[in-house]
Image (cartoon, grey):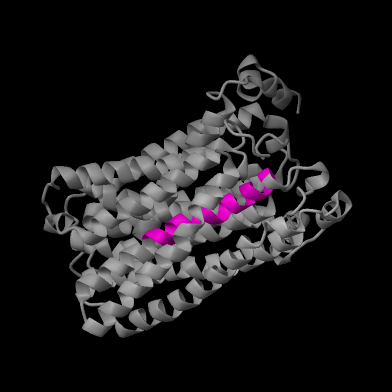
Amino acid sequence: MEFLRAIEQSSFSQWVTGSSSVLAFPTILLLHTIGMGVVVGINAGIDLRILGLAPALPLAPMERFFPLLWVGFWVNAFTGVILLAADATTKMTNPDFYVKMGFIALAIINLRIIRNRVFRDPFIDKKPITSDVKVLAVTSMIFWLGAITAGRLMAYVGPVSGLTK
Amino acid sequence: MNLAHVHLLLNHFPTIGFGIALGLFLVSLLRNNEDLRRTSLVIFFLISALAIPTYQSGNAALETLCSGPEGSCPPGVSMATVRAHEDAALPGFALMELTGFIAWLGLWQFRYIKRTPRWNVASVLLLSILSFGLMARAANIGGEIRHPEIEGTTQEQTAADGTVHGVVRSLGMYVTGHTWVWPSCETLHFVGLSILFTVLLLVDLRMLGVGKGMSFAALYQLLPLGMLGFALNLVTGMFFFIGAPEQYTKNPVFYWKMLFVMLGAANILYFMLLDEPWTVGAGDDAPLTAKLAAGSAIFLWVGVLFFGHMLPFLGNAF
């Protein structure tokens, strides 16, 4: 707890939460939200295509969107760490934060399995999608939905600093 | 010009616009004219988009008009009539949005299967007549808000009117009075945002050159998904608005957000109506205008997210 308090009271954390500049807390949280839209947006596109939406759309070219997806992911990892440091004593003691991290870990593992199973297959668009891949698409959507819900609820449940409201 | 004038200006468009579109739609059915039918569907769609700020400006007009102690109205203005107008406007507005959505779907299907199915024509006809009727009724009640003939109303009477709650105000108090409603709507608003981003990123980045193996014709199948994401956000967003209208009606950042939503609605029509994007097959480079339309779509919807996010920071919400 002492450690968390020290992080929270570092001059950087104080700038993030205390500065009246729109570049501090508002912009960092904005980037976190745009990153979410990019990561979940692209992921949901892949999942829904696997589940049969827009069947005329080939899967293979969707792999070109993976670099952007990872940019979004790292932007969110980076801004997420800043937001965590700025509010460490509150967020690290909120069970909902660990629920969110759990969902994101599962979603990323799920994404890597989908990439290996679907996008590494040279005949990806030449044969029907098997039902186990469809199950992976469903679990992927459940995990991202869980991550969004847990993330949004961090402003409302458990210890709340009032910062993110 | 104040915000009440904005409402007085905007409030003619939904009723008159839907009237014109309905007339054109009926003529197109009688003459079996596909071009005219598509024109009326476009008008239905654009007017339903314009109905969003029109509805919202009503709350702004109320706050401008009834700004006395405890929201009391000036002599000659009855709060009961204001609330009756609001209660008539919300169902009209909701049906109008549904009509706009179905009309948009008709336009989408026309391009996709080369005709508008019978069920779509029937739904648009029925819904537009209903919403036109409800909106005309709301407009009629709205016209009665100012009563020059009862100029002598005492201040006590109008102040007491401030406690009058209609159905919409009760719904708004339900939203703010129950701790689960706002966070649930927030969560769904973020889900809707992500769904909208799915379509925005795949379609528009493809036009800009990412994943050229996808043809526009194949991506076109995704557009209704994006519209569903928007619909989810319109519904959840309206819960926020009805719950705490004063956070939005006096917030310039919100005006910008709504302006960008209107421009986004116009932007999607490029991909629905013009032949040009359809020339983009698998592996093709998109023409410059398609790239400009795609780039502006990304700019506009990221802008909507930006203004929405900045409501409490640059604006005065919360």
Magenta-highlighted stretch: main secondary structure? helix
Q: Is residue A111 above or below residue B97?
A: above
Instruction: Specify whether A119 is left or right of B149.
Output: left
Residue A119 position (above or below residue B42): above
State the image quarter where residue B120 is shown.
Answer: bottom left
Camera sees residue B264: yes
Q: Residue at x 34, y 58 (%)?
A: A46
Position of residue B169 measured from the top left corner of the image (x, y, whole percent) = 72, 60
Residue A75 placement (x, y as % from top left): 44, 34
Q: State which region is magenta.
A: B46-64
Q: Quadrant of the C terminus of chain B?
A: top right
Check the picture and name the quadrant holding the N terminus of chain B.
Answer: top right
**Residue in the picture at 51% in, 41% down:** B255
Residue at x 52%, y 75% (from the top left corner):
B133
Number of marks: 0
- Image coords of residue B201 (percent x, y): 33, 48
Along the line of sight, the residue nearer the viewer: A43 or A130:
A43
Based on the displayed image, in which of its 4 quarters is residue A116 positioned? Answer: bottom left
In the rendered image of this protein, does residue B63 appear above or below residue B94? above
Q: Is residue B182 magenta?
A: no
Seen at 63% across and 51% down, the residue is: B59
Q: Residue B163's x, y, as percent?
A: 83, 56
Q: Nearer the viewer, residue A123 or B301?
A: B301
Residue B191 seen in render? no
- Residue B99 is drawn in which quadrant? bottom left
